[in-house]
């Protein structure tokens, strides 16, 4: 697993640096990491990622893109593909005003001892995005590092990209999102107490609070929850619960065949398939009848035993 690290005061090894946001760590990112790993190994370099937080758009007064993965999860996923460290540079007005030359000289060479720098072909850096790949190559020649770009990879639908994942999630197409990511999109948060409405219907739910990742379109999803190291089938509702509330967005997971206390613990839920959109029912009995249908549909996607235990939550 790679380490999530602030910029070190000193480094004792030369680095091969991948620079980028890497949100989602999708299949394109994985291909780049593997290729950079081969290049780093051939040169005897430690393979690392340089990323920035907060997102530059936020500092520059533009809305940042919806988050697909937290920084900590990004580091863990990158570590699975050979990245030994993820360096996080705080992006502020000072960084935004840095010239391309100072960026390369002070950050890449002095602070991180970069000997190989790998970026996308459309990489821009420095004040007013004045630096591009050609600039980086030229600076590398002056400062003693090699700069190169990586190609976009994709499938018949187009290049793999974080934007493509977000577009799929916006329509609830979590299967298309997973095809780009190489795994289901995950929502994670702390299990908080709700109004116990699910329990009164016979389907207690774990309610996720403080979720940072992008939510899919409102609806009901078949999912797999990670509970104490085990994968647990689940039905997840994302939306405003129009039959019983309708005032706020919530994420509620009914874990199938589970009996245990989840309150105040962290829960991660991978979204596997969309079962239906959000619907306002005529009453609680109609809602309960639909939940039974949703559970059966989820089992069709996920497998699992008939309805059993009762997960804590509401």
Image (cartoon, helix red, strand yellow):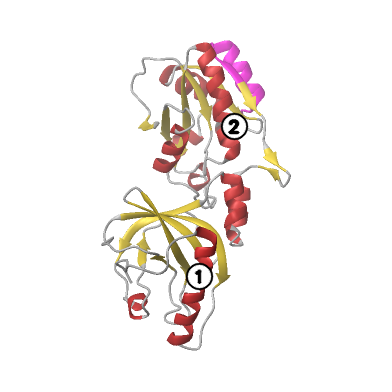
Q: Is residue 212 above or below residue 98?
A: below
- The dot on residue 296 is 1
Q: Classify residue 93 as left or right of residue 217.
A: left
Q: CA distance from mark 2 to mark 1?
A: 37 Å
Which residue is rendered at x = 59% and y = 50% of the image?
Answer: 165
Q: Could you tell whether 297 is left or right of 206 in the image? A: right
Answer whether residue 135 is magenta in the image. yes
For the N terminus, give its image quadrant.
top left
Quadrant assignment, res 278? bottom right
> In this picture, which residue range is highlighted in magenta?
130-147
Q: Nearer the viewer, mark 2 or mark 1?
A: 1
Pick whichever, 126 or 288, lies toward us.
288
Task: Considering the whole magenta stretch, tell me its main secondary structure.
Answer: helix
Q: Is residue 28 magenta?
A: no
Which residue is depicted at the point 48% across and 67% down? 238
Dot placed on the residue nearer the N-terminal end, 2 or 1 = 2
Q: What is the crowding at mark 1: few (fewer than 14 residues within 10 Å), some, or many (at least 20)? A: some
Percent position (x, y) of residue 117? 55, 22
Name the residue nearer the viewer: 70 or 128: 70
Name the element at disc 2. Answer: helix
The circle drawn on residue 34 is none
Residue 225 lies left or right of residue 27; in this view the side is left
Q: Position of residue 276 (x, y in %)?
A: 57, 70
Residue toward you, 166 or 308 = 308
Residue name at image x 57 percent, y 36 percent: 29
Q: Residue at x 48, y 59 (%)?
A: 223
Specify the label residue 31 is tagged with.
2
Q: Secondary structure at mark 1?
A: helix
């Amino acid at each position: 697993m790679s380490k999530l690290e602030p910029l070190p005061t000193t480094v004792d090894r030369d680095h091969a640096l991948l620079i980028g946001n890497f949100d989602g760590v999708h299949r394109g990112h994985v291909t780049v990491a593997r290729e950079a790993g081969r290049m780093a190994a051939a040169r005897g370099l430690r393979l690392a990622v340089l990323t920035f937080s907060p997102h530059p758009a936020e500092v520059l007064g533009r809305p940042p893109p919806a988050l697909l993965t937290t920084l900590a999860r990004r580091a863990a996923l990158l570590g699975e593909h050979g990245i030994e460290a993820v360096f996080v540079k705080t992006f502020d007005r000072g960084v935004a005003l840095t010239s391309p030359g100072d960026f390369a000289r002070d950050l890449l060479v002095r602070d991180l001892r970069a000997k190989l720098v790998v970026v996308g072909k459309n990489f821009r850096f420095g004040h007013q995005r004045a630096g591009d790949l050609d600039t980086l190559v030229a600076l590398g020649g002056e400062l003693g590092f090699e700069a190169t770009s990586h190609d976009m990879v994709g499938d018949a639908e187009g290049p793999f990209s974080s934007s493509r994942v977000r577009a799929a999630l916006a329509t609830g197409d979590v299967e298309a999102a997973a095809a780009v990511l190489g795994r289901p999109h995950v929502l994670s948060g702390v299990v908080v107490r709700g109004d116990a409405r699910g329990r009164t219907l016979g389907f207690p739910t774990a309610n996720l609070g403080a979720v940072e990742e992008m939510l899919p379109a409102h609806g009901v999803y078949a999912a797999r929850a990670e509970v104490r190291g085990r994968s647990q089938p689940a039905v997840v509702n994302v939306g405003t619960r129009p039959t019983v509330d309708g005032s706020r967005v919530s994420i509620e997971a009914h874990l199938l065949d589970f009996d245990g206390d989840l309150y105040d613990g962290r829960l991660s839920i991978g979204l596997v398939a969309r079962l239906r959109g959000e619907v306002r029912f005529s009453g609680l009995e109609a809602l309960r009848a639909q939940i039974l249908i949703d559970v059966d549909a989820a089992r069709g996607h996920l497998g699992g035993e008939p309805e059993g235990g009762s997960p804590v939550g509401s």
